[in-house]
Each structure stands twice: as C-alpha cells, then as structure tokens.
C-alpha cells in the first residue's frame, strides 16, 4: 500500500507519494514529489493522475524475473509483460479507488459461475449473482444453489484461514462439498479418494499414495515459494495438484482455489478459468502428461490476461 510522507524543513513542509514494493525477496521504494503540504493534497487522486508512471516504475523493478515465465512458453513472449503490467496497474487502481471489497465480490460472482460450470453445473450467471447479492434465487436446482453457497463459504475460508497443509486441503474440500450430491441420492464422500480415478486418458495418483504425494507437493511449495516467479509457482502447483487428484470429485474446484491463494499471497489478483475455454483447459492439462507443459503455461497466461481485463472493467465502473 502507498502513503504520503511529509518532510519538514525550517520554512515549509513537503509531501511525497511513497509506495514500498517487495517482490521475490527484494524491495524497492517508489517515491514521487507532491509539492508543498496542503489540505488539498490527496494520495488517491495523485495515484490516479500518475498511475502509468508509477506502474511503469514498479514494472521496471519486477521485469527481470519475467525470464522464468518466458522460458516456459513457446510463443507470444510479450504476454508475460502485459500480464505483469496489468497486475501492477490493477493493484494501483484498487489502492487509488479503495475498492478491494467491490472487486472481491464481483470476482467471486464470475469465478464461482465459471468454476462450477466447468465441472458440470448448469446454473446461469444471473442466479449466481442473485445468491451472492441477495442470499438466494428462484433457480430450481437446489443442489446447484447449495454448490454456489458452499463456494462462497470456501472462498471466505481460503482468504481467512487456509494454510498450506493437509488439514486445510481436506477442510477446503469439505466446505465446498458439504450436503451436496454428486448424483441423485449419492453424497460426496468424506476425505481422500478410496478408489482410483482417471481424468480423460490420464491415470492419477493411486489412493494409497495420495497423502504422501500431497505432502511432497506441499514440501515443494515451501522450498520454492521464494525462488519461483509467483505465476509459475501457482500454475505449477495447480498442475501437480490436478495430477494427484486427491478426491473422488471436486479436484478442479479445490485446485483452482488453492492456485488463487498462492497468487493472492504474493500480491496478484486471483484469476478465472473460463467455462468457454473448458476443453482447452483440460487438453492443456492432459498434454502435461505427454511432456508438453508449454501449452499449459500458455493457456494459463491467456486466462490470467482475460481475468485481469475483466477486473479492470469492474474497477472502471466503480
């Protein structure tokens, strides 16, 4: 977050806009003169008036880390730069307009609709908005209504209480699936899967190995969270998590939430995998098993750009 810093001299007080940036273990301070201190000085207005300049200075500090991303994709090397700039600008806009709560609510509407529809829900976007805004809807499918309400609770749990451990992953799954039916009369089972599941043509981790592989993934995360660029860290975690597929169902929904926890914990806004890109999403994950990770990373970067365009449109309406 930014603030105004006052420097006192014998004759006058001078104001400066100050933003401290910490990224990948390094820090820099962006400082811009605002002139003489006065009652009309406004940090938010100054940030809005100078947002491109301030965003560019932060980008120049962070861009040296983009080589990690560029090496992961096969084309469109400008895309990581566009995403990094968009991420910084979004944070500056939210700071200037003090609208993080509004952004979170609008994001939740879009994220929950798309995430649930990817997994087979038919609930329309308007019904999701009604549930989030009013607490209920006239939509007829009670199971899908409950699915949305669980997703809201899961998102709140993610932001406030989720930790990177086995207990939190199980808790997130439980919050998402409590009192839901996978099929008519068949409830979601508690805990990790007890039978092997296959995604497309890909065999996932055997039930007896799920916990040990998740422990290994969490260890990998702890060892690399300060070394790997946050976008790659989040995407790689998601890729590996979906390969394990720890639950009988609900793996995509839990996995996309955890991916966003990683992003939010490192100063990025969360992202949406859009339902209209469902086939490309599943195909890119499947290609990973054939040693073709670049397609997956490219896809996730494109979804990030699309998500950040949506969030910027939300802020512009505020």
Image (cartoon, rainbow, N blue to C red):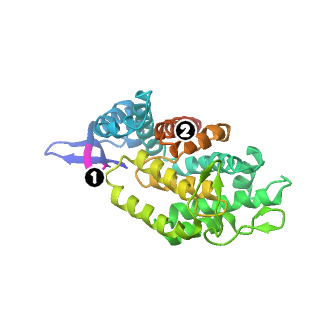
175 and 20: which one is in front?
A: 175
Residue 158, image quadrant = bottom right
Q: Eyeballing the image, is 121 above or below 274?
A: below
* Residue 307 placement, left or right of 218: right
Position in image of residue 183 (x %, y %): 80, 61
Which is more foreground, mark 1 or mark 2?
Answer: 2
Position in image of residue 188 (x %, y %): 72, 67
Position in image of residue 69 (x %, y %): 38, 39
* Residue 117 placement, left or right of 312: right
Question: Circle 1 sits on which residue?
Answer: 25
Q: Quadrant of the C terminus?
A: top right
Residue at x 55% of width, y 61% of height: 205
Residue at x 27% of width, y 37% of height: 32
35 and 215: which one is in front?
A: 215
* Mark number displayed over residue 303: 2
- Badge 1 density bin: few <14, some 14–19, many ≥20, Cα 10 Å: few
Closer to the N terminus: mark 1 or mark 2? 1
Question: Taking the image as drawn, is residue 318 in sight?
Answer: no
* Residue 38 placement, left or right of 246: left
| SS label for mark 2 | helix
Position in image of residue 285 (x %, y %): 56, 45
Magenta segment range? Answer: 23-29
182 and 93: which one is in front?
A: 182
Q: Main secondary structure of the magenta part?
A: strand
> Do callouts 1 and 2 mark residues in contact (Cβ within 8 Å)?
no
Q: Is 283 covered by the magenta stretch?
A: no
Residue 203, image quadrant = bottom right
| SS label for mark 1 | loop
Question: Taking the image as drawn, is residue 156 in sight?
Answer: yes
């Amino acid at each position: 977050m930014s603030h105004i810093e006052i420097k006192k001299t014998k004759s006058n007080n001078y104001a400066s806009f100050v933003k401290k940036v910490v990224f990948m273990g390094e820090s820099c301070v962006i400082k811009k003169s605002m002139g003489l201190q006065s009652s009309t000085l406004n940090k938010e207005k100054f940030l809005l008036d100078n947002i491109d300049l301030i965003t560019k200075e932060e980008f120049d500090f962070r861009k040296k880390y983009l080589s990690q991303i560029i090496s992961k994709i096969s084309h469109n090397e400008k895309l990581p730069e566009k995403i990094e700039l968009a991420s910084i600008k979004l944070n500056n806009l939210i700071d200037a307009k003090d609208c993080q709560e509004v952004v979170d609510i609008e994001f939740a509407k879009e994220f929950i609709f798309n995430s649930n529809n990817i997994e087979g829900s038919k609930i329309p976007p308007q019904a999701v908005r009604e549930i989030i805004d009013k607490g209920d809807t006239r939509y007829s499918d009670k199971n899908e209504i409950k699915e949305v309400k669980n997703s809201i609770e899961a998102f709140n749990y993610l932001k406030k209480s989720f930790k990177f451990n086995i207990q939190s992953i199980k808790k997130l799954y439980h919050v998402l699936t409590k009192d839901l039916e996978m099929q008519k009369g068949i409830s979601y089972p508690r805990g990790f899967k007890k039978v092997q599941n296959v995604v497309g043509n890909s065999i996932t981790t055997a039930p007896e190995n799920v916990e040990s592989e998740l422990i290994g993934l969490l260890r990998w995360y702890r060892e690399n969270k300060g070394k790997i660029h946050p976008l790659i860290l989040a995407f790689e975690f998601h890729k590996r998590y979906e390969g394990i597929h720890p639950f009988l169902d609900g793996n995509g929904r839990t996995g996309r939430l955890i991916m966003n926890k990683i992003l939010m914990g490192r100063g990025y806004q969360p992202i949406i995998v859009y339902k209209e890109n469902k086939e490309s999403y599943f195909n890119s994950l499947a290609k990973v098993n054939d040693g073709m990770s670049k397609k997956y990373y490219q896809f996730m970067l494109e979804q990030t750009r699309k998500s950040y365009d949506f969030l910027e449109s939300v802020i512009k309406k505020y």
